[in-house]
Image (cartoon, grey):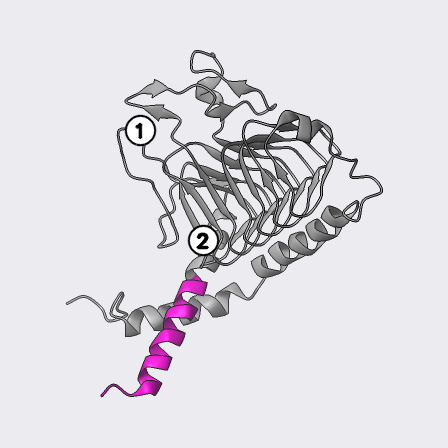
């Protein structure tokens, strides 16, 4: 029978090792503005398929923090000072690319994923947005430079929310816990209450408030939404951005040298490296 303390120790070692990997991803990216070559267990390339024949690695901007239990795959751009919390996922292996703007936060359990944007090399109508928020037809000259998901700057994607492309989210917008945005455009300075659904091709204008539990599936519903100003969510994003920017900065300034020592010890114990000289 396996000693339970051996199991606990092994699990603890694996957790520390994963933490070290996450820390070193970010210390490595700090050497340049972006990194598109890093391969870690939680950050890696997509695979080639008939709907996505380009293999790409994530591009992670300087000073972002990707937790070792977050997942970033394929054609994902993660902007400056972005915090990706534990169990968050940016999966750029079907619909691509996925863009997360500077100073945004992707909280625990958030999923970023998109419907395929091409099939057998052919573009698919309305599966990408331009950076400015236009839905793009397959023959639009801007399609190749478009995004399956575009998330602007200073956006908060709260716990367990999902943005599933095709989708576009403007700057300074808050997406509440367990909310879904799919096949929709959400403007800037919008606040979406918890457990809401925004879908079916609707466009939510700037400065709108989506009350908690709302299901917005027609443009008439979207147009009838109240203003964020004066709502209970009026200033929520400012506070959330402040917290997550500080977390990203603090995690990135931990004692990296000490963590590197832990990494070397754990890797040596697992037989991944050896400090013994070659014969």
Q: Nearer the viewer, residue 108 or 142?
A: 108
Q: Position of residue 81 (x, y in %)?
A: 60, 47
Element type where label 1 sits in the image: loop
64 part of magenta stretch: no
The residue that disc 2 covers is 25
| Quarter placement of the N terminus | bottom left
The residue that disc 1 covers is 51
Q: Which residues are magenta?
A: 1-20
Q: Nearer the viewer, residue 128 or 77?
A: 128
Q: Compared to 228, does 146 lie above or below?
A: above
Q: Quadrant of residue 104?
A: top right
Marks 2 and 1 close (CB-CB < 8 Å): no
Q: How many marks?
A: 2
Taking the image as shown, residue 98 lies to the left or right of residue 104, namely: left
Q: Position of residue 237 (x, y in %)?
A: 72, 47
Taking the image as shown, residue 128 lies to the left or right of residue 236, namely: left
Q: Quadrant of residue 127?
A: top left
Residue drawn at the location 75% of the way across and 47% of the way down: 238
Taking the image as shown, residue 100 lies to the left or right of residue 273, namely: right
């Amino acid at each position: 029978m396996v000693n339970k303390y051996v199991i606990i120790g092994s699990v603890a070692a694996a957790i520390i090792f994963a933490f070290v990997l996450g820390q070193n991803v970010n210390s490595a990216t700090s050497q340049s503005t972006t990194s598109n070559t890093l391969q870690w267990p939680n950050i890696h390339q997509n695979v080639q398929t008939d709907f996505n024949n380009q293999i790409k690695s994530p591009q992670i901007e300087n000073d972002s923090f990707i937790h070792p239990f977050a997942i970033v795959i394929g054609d994902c751009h993660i902007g400056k000072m972005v915090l990706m919390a534990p169990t968050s996922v940016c999966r750029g292996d079907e619909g691509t690319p996925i863009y997360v703007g500077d100073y945004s936060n992707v909280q625990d359990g958030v999923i970023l994923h998109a419907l395929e944007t091409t099939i057998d090399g052919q573009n698919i109508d309305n599966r990408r947005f331009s950076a400015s928020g236009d839905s793009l037809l397959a023959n639009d000259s801007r399609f190749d430079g478009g995004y399956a998901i575009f998330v602007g700057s200073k956006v908060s994607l709260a716990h367990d929310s999902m943005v599933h492309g095709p989708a576009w989210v403007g700057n300074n917008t808050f997406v509440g816990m367990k909310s879904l945005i799919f096949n929709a455009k959400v403007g800037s300075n919008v606040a979406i209450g918890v457990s809401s659904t925004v879908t079916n091709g609707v466009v939510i204008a700037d400065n709108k408030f989506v009350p908690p539990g709302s299901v917005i599936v027609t443009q008439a519903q979207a147009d009838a939404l109240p203003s964020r100003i004066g709502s209970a969510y009026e200033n929520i994003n400012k506070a959330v951005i402040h917290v997550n920017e500080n977390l990203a900065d603090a995690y990135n300034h931990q004692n990296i040298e000490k963590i590197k020592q832990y990494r070397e010890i754990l890797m040596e114990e697992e037989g991944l490296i050896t400090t013994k000289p070659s014969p």
